[in-house]
Image (cartoon, helix red, strand yellow):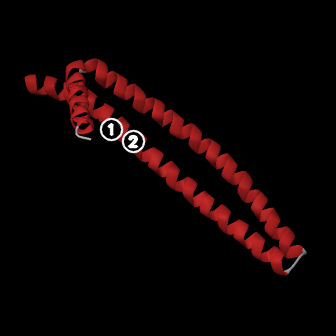
């Protein structure tokens, strides 16, 4: 009976850790997708520059149109990614707050250890 109770108690902290890991993965994925969008934007801008140097006309207008479309898509994507990252950040902060409230003494101990270590290294300057 105690093993079942212990298993249930451990599941809550595992779910919180899992939520934190999911938030981190989602943030990384959003950053990678944003980077891809900006690489595409840069390549379209380079194509625009190359096409306007040699030929003014249909090709330049087409390149400008593609660049404007890419800029609009990048702005929309960036706004969506920022919203997603903010949402995941709030989830991570909430999980950290819950962790600190459930285990205040270990957190205080770690904070004290970090403070002593930082004081040691700063005093050696």
Q: Relative to 12, does residue 101 appear above or below in the rendering?
A: above
Q: Relative to 87, does residue 57 appear above or below in the rendering?
A: below
- Percent across and percent down for residue 36 are 57, 60
Indicate the secondary structure of the residue bearing disc 1.
Answer: helix
- Percent across and percent down for residue 41 are 67, 61
The residue that appears at 30% across and 35% down in the rendered structure is: 17
Q: Relative to 32, does residue 80 appear above or below in the rendering?
A: above
Query: Within 10 angstroms of label 1, few (less than 14), some, or many (20 or more) residues?
Result: few
Q: Closer to the camera, 56 or 18?
A: 56
- Percent across and percent down for residue 51 are 80, 76
> Among all residues in the image, which is located at the extreme front?
125
- Percent across and percent down for residue 33 are 54, 55
The residue that appears at 73% across and 72% down in the rendered structure is: 47
| CA gap, disc 2 and disc 1 | 6 Å
The answer to whether one can see residue 3 in this image is yes
Residue 54 tag number: none
Q: Can you tell which quarter of the image residue 124 is in?
A: top left
Residue position for label 1: 18
The residue that appears at 17% across and 29% down in the rendered structure is: 7
Asked if marks 2 and 1 touch (Cβ < 8 Å), the reply is yes
Query: Within 10 angstroms of label 2, few (less than 14), some, or many (20 or more) residues?
Result: some
> Among all residues in the image, which is located at the extreme bottom?
54
Q: Relative to 38, does residue 16 appear above or below in the rendering?
A: above
Question: Is residue 63 left or right of 123 when viewed as pictured?
Answer: right
Residue position for label 2: 22
Image quarter hosting the C terminus: top left
């Amino acid at each position: 009976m105690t093993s079942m109770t212990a298993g249930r108690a451990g599941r809550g902290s595992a779910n919180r850790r899992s939520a934190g890991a999911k938030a981190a993965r989602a943030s990384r994925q959003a950053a990678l997708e944003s980077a891809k969008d900006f690489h595409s934007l840069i390549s379209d801008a380079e194509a625009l520059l190359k096409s306007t140097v040699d030929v003014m006309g249909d090709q330049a207008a087409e390149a400008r149109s593609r660049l404007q479309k890419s800029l609009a898509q990048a702005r929309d994507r960036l706004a969506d990614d920022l919203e997603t990252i903010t949402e995941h950040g709030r989830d991570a902060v909430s999980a950290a707050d819950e962790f600190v409230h459930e285990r205040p003494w270990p957190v205080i101990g770690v904070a004290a250890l970090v403070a002593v270590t930082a004081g040691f290294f700063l005093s050696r300057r």
